[in-house]
């Protein structure tokens, strides 16, 4: 079988959160790790796992500093890029971009995390509704924003879901293209797909598989503490170590950023018609195989 060519960047992506141009100036290294998700799909959890496997077990690890969101436009790339390039240890960075707005390198290894869009929205709402004035100021009032400022969320979560669904990711960024563009390159040898539900079902097995993919050698004696520090419960109790700026963008603190890690909360709010519309749209946008994987983690 002829191997798939590496994808090429075809566009830039800008909004209140993004400045994709930073990837044009980023200098890849042979052992770079890139964590990609749409958002609220287990990104911070994955950063903690990889950080602990690489450099742990370390209960004091400031993973948000070690693993910045590269394409977030604040701080600007002129500030962020030199800090990333000055890192001497193995780098693991995060992105929320679709593949076609990212510079993709065969030198790096990529882990893509998927989660049912309905679960994403429930986590996203918690993130958004608890954000404080500093968060809005950073995203909407700092130089470099392209497009409108980010909207404040409505009080009703079903209304929030409806707008997100009807306007494809509003007020953040498009959902379906993110999943679709990554799914298209899932068979590349330097790409690994992980599902949020699998992390919940079998964290040790999932982490061992990731360590093998990333060529991380973990001393067997270290695994119990690494797994402890990567448990959702431990991260919730110690959220200031893994959340950007220690949770300064949320008045309730870092623990509100690490919310519940629970799937299916939408069952009690969305109607049967709501869910049927979402599921039909998923198949239309992604195809049956990808839609099934996104909903369940099953790959056939």
Image (tube, rainbow, N blue to C red):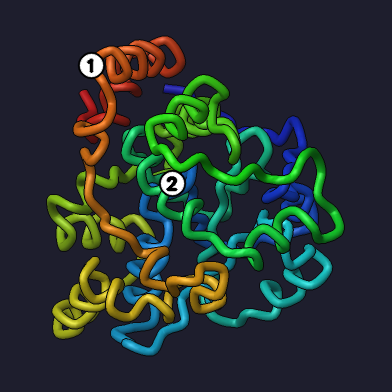
Residue shown at 71% from the left, 36% from the top: 9
Mark 1, residue position: 272
The answer to whether residue 292 shows anywhere in this view is yes
Task: Note whether 216 is above or below 38 in the view shown.
Answer: below
Q: Which image quadrant for residue 228? A: bottom left
Provide the secondary structure element on which disc 1 rests.
helix
Q: Which mark is residue 95?
A: none
Q: Secondary structure at mark 2?
A: helix
Q: Residue 35's x, y, as percent?
A: 48, 54
Left or right of residue 146, residue 62 in this image: left
Picture quadrant of residue 69: bottom right
Number of residues whose C-alpha sits closer than 10 Å to that of mark 2, classed few (under 14), some (14–19) or many (20 or more): many
From the viewer's perspective, tell me whether residue 20 is left or right of residue 32. Answer: right
- Residue occupying the point 83% across, 68% down: 78
Q: Residue at x 50, y 73 (%)?
A: 247
Return the x and y of residue 123 as percentages of the image width and height. Answer: 37, 48
In the rendered view of the protein, which quadrant contains the N terminus?
A: top left
* Figure check: 69 above or below 1: below
Report if the CB atoms under discs 1 and 2 are less than 8 Å apart. no
Q: Which mark is residue 125?
A: 2
Image coordinates of residue 178 in percent, x first then y, are: 53, 33
131 vs 146, nearest the viewer: 131
**Residue placed at 29% from the left, 20% from the top?**
275
Rendering coords of residue 56 (x, y %)? 33, 83
Name the outermost residue toward the front: 155
The quarter of the rendered structure image containing the C terminus is top left
Residue 172 vs 74, above or below: the answer is above
Q: 283 or 254: nearer the eye?
A: 254
Badge 1 local density, few (<14 within 10 Å), some, or many (20+)? Answer: few
């Amino acid at each position: 079988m002829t191997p798939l060519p590496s994808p090429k960047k075809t566009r830039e992506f800008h909004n209140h959160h993004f400045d994709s141009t930073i990837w044009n100036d980023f200098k890849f290294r042979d052992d770079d790790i890139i964590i990609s998700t749409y958002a609220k799909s287990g990104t911070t959890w994955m950063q903690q796992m990889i950080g602990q496997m690489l450099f742990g077990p370390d209960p004091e690890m400031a993973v948000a500093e070690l693993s910045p969101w590269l394409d977030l436009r604040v701080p600007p790339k002129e500030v962020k890029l030199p800090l990333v390039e000055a890192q001497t240890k193995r780098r693991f960075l995060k992105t929320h971009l679709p593949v076609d707005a990212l510079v993709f390198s065969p030198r790096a290894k990529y882990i893509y995390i998927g989660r049912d869009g309905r679960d994403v929205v429930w986590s996203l709402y918690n993130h958004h509704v608890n954000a404080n004035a500093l968060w809005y100021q950073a995203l909407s009032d700092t130089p470099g924003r392209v497009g409108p400022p980010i909207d404040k969320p409505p009080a009703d979560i079903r209304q929030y879901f409806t707008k997100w669904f009807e306007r494809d990711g509003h007020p953040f960024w498009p959902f379906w293209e993110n999943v679709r563009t990554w799914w298209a390159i899932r068979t590349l040898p330097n790409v690994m797909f992980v599902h949020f539900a699998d992390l919940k079902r079998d964290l040790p097995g999932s982490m061992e598989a990731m360590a093998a993919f990333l060529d991380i050698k973990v001393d067997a004696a270290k695994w119990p503490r690494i797994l402890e520090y990567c448990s959702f419960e431990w991260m919730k109790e110690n959220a200031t170590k893994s959340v950007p700026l220690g949770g300064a963008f949320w008045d309730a603190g870092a623990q509100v950023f690490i919310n519940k890690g629970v799937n299916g909360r939408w069952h009690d709010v969305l109607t049967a018609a709501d869910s049927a519309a979402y599921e039909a749209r998923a198949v239309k946008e992604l195809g049956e195989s990808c839609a099934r994987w996104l909903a369940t983690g099953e790959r056939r």
